[in-house]
Amino acid sequence: MGVNPRRLGVGGKVRRGVFLLDDHESVRAAIRRLIEATDDLSVVGESGTVAGTITRIISSRPDVAILDVRLPDGSGVEVGRDIRIHCPEVRCLMLTSCPDDEALVATAGAGAAGYLSKPISAADLLRAVRWLASGEQHPIVHALVAE
């Protein structure tokens, strides 16, 4: 089976796949533009709601899923738990505009590999995605990825 053409970068280099889950189209569009401007990452799917997200993630097989914690029809934390069950190889990066200790504990309990607060700089978001896509085992990250 060949590599998805969307996952081929410059010189035929395979790009790491990223799935986006955020209820704000403008946020998804900004993250998509940022990721697609790189030569090592590619958006392989996205959703604005919890409904149907797991099916999309299973079919798109991303390396990293960026999940908004609070969604109108559920929680990115619940999606993260489902990802751990159905696609344990996918690393989850939780984003939240309302950081609190309860959310951090919930994301850790769901098996999230990272936790970032909005707003976040483009450089820090890309660093976090690349770090998670590398597959290294590290404890959950809060706020910013360590320099």
Image (cartoon, rainbow, N blue to C red):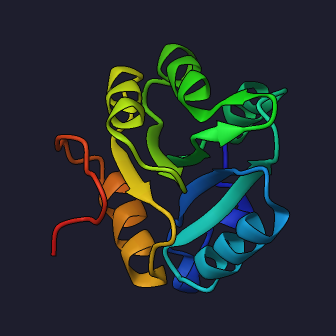
Measured from the top left, where is residue 46 in percent x and y? 76, 51
Quadrant including the C terminus? bottom left
Q: Where, by quadrant of the figure, is residue 143 drawn?
A: bottom left
Quadrant including the N terminus? top right
Say above or below: 95 vs 9: above
**What residue lies at 80% left-to-right and 71% top-to-bottom?**
26
Say above or below: 73 vs 98: above
Measured from the top left, where is residue 87 in percent x and y? 53, 24
**What residue lies at 84% left-to-right and 27% top-to-bottom?**
51
Say above or below: 142 vs 11: above
Q: Where, by quadrant of the figure, is residue 31 drawn?
A: bottom right
Measured from the top left, where is residue 145 in percent x and y? 25, 65
Asked if residue 107 lies left or right of residue 46, the reply is left
User: In front here: 116 or 92?
Assistant: 116
**What residue lies at 78% left-to-right and 50% top-to-bottom?**
23
**What residue lies at 71% left-to-right and 41% top-to-bottom?**
60
Asked if residue 55 lies left or right of residue 70, the reply is right
User: In front here: 55 or 100?
Assistant: 100
Asked if residue 19 lies left or right of residue 47, the reply is left
Picture mark count: 0
